[in-house]
Image (cartoon, rainbow, N blue to C red):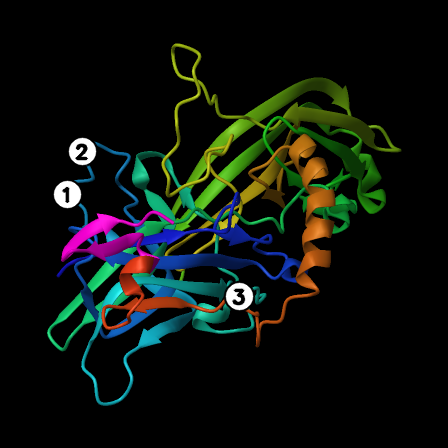
Amino acid sequence: MTAFVRVSGPPNSNFLVGYPGISATLPRIEGKVEIRPAHGTTASVNVSLVTVCLQRRETIHPSADSVTKKHLTAARKEFSEVVGREMLLFRTPPGRDVDAILSMDLPFVIFIPFGRGHETGNQRAPPASIQLPSRTAETLYEIVVTLQQGHAEQRKYVFPVPIARYDTLSTFGMYNRPESAERVSDHLVTLGISLPKWSYGPLDPVSVYIKLSPNPDWLSKARKVTISKIAIGIDEEIIYNHEGDEPTRKVKTLAKQSQAVGVRLPEPGYLTNMGLVFPSKDMRDSEGIIPRGKKEFPVYAVTGFTTTGSLYKIEYYLTVKATMSGAKDITLRQPIVVCPFDQAFCKQEMEAIEQAARDAAHTSQENPMLPAPTVVRSTEPGGMRALGVAMVAGHRKPLIE
């Protein structure tokens, strides 16, 4: 007899509890595996073994966005692994191959790792679910229930679950410390920049302080330098197969802004402040309606964000270029972090994250205190009663209490 398998989350909430990427919240998947007969009401299902795990799948195809190249290059590359550990939910007692089951409810909890990269394999903090345009790269997560029915038959049931990362929120203090960098050209001019913060989301303002300083040891030559213009931009760099032998890099400029200057470099230096708005993806279609997103991926207002998977890596840079006459142009690339959420959302989530951390303090990874499983076997006298069925004169009838 085939089985109907379903995974349900906690009442009035999602599978995902806590905030992935933030260890204090003990991010985890909570739910219950429900097994029933696929046909009829009281026909039993043979069950030998039930396990559940969280599986991550990644795929890349760097040329998928090109109509001419995608059929000429190598096929899509795939990678999958189990996140955390696989959990054994049910096994028949020794001496029996199968149990005839009428219904089965098996609670489970899968803790999502929150390692910072020193761990190996499936103990690292997993990257967020994402699908880039044209599916050049994607990461998705699935709850996989394995049902063994005797020696010969084993089936897997897959249920997608979207996962976001919250350790790059722009409201965290570590991202609000000023970052500075310098670059020298011809030993005549030094380009220095300072960023008041370095994590940005959709429609967040990006501001940068810029200073061009002459070299005091070559002041006579530096005075002859003319600053033509200064340009800033945000670059997205996607590295496919970054841990392999032949990585592929693709760089795209998301936004840029330029300022004409046309003055000689003064002795104290030239200071200016430039800014732009981080681009946002239009969530609405041509009719102004926000379409329902795919159940495997959260809906983001950006096409990409800072993340590192096993097959690809997405990085972002703030690029500042000073164009001059009398000296070589200077280009400085400063790494920044791109968060999929805007600043208003980040501020709203801070209180919820603090509450989730307080709630997680009462949860133990070694003993999460799960509810007891409910298993109704066909041999139990009250088995049909648990399904709301009673035997009346040899016929099955709905049970009326």
Q: Quadrant of residue 333?
A: top right
Image quarter in which the N terminus is found: bottom left
Q: Is residue 216 magenta?
A: no
Give the magenta-colored segment's residue range: 386-401
Dot 1: few (<14), some (14–19), or many (≥20) neighbours within 10 Å?
few
Q: Quadrant of residue 207?
A: top right
The residue beneath circle 1 is: 72
Dot 3: what SS? loop
Residue for point 65% across, 24% down: 276
Name the foreground residue: 336 vs 162: 162
- Which of disc 2 and disc 3 is earlier in sequence? 2
The residue beneath circle 2 is: 68
Residue 398 located left or right of residue 122: left
Query: Which residue ends up furthest to the front in the rendered image?
Result: 393
Residue for point 84% across, 28% down: 266
Q: Is residue 387 magenta?
A: yes
Q: Position of residue 138 (x, y in %)?
A: 36, 46
Name the foreground residue: 341 vs 319: 341
**Numbered disc in front, either 1 or 3:** 3
Q: Position of residue 60 (x, y in %)?
A: 31, 49
Residue 200 located left or right of residue 156: right
Distance between the alpha carbons at the discs numbered 2 and 1: 7 Å
Distance between the alpha carbons at the discs numbered 1 and 3: 38 Å
Cβ–Cβ below 8 Å for labels 2 and 1?
Answer: yes
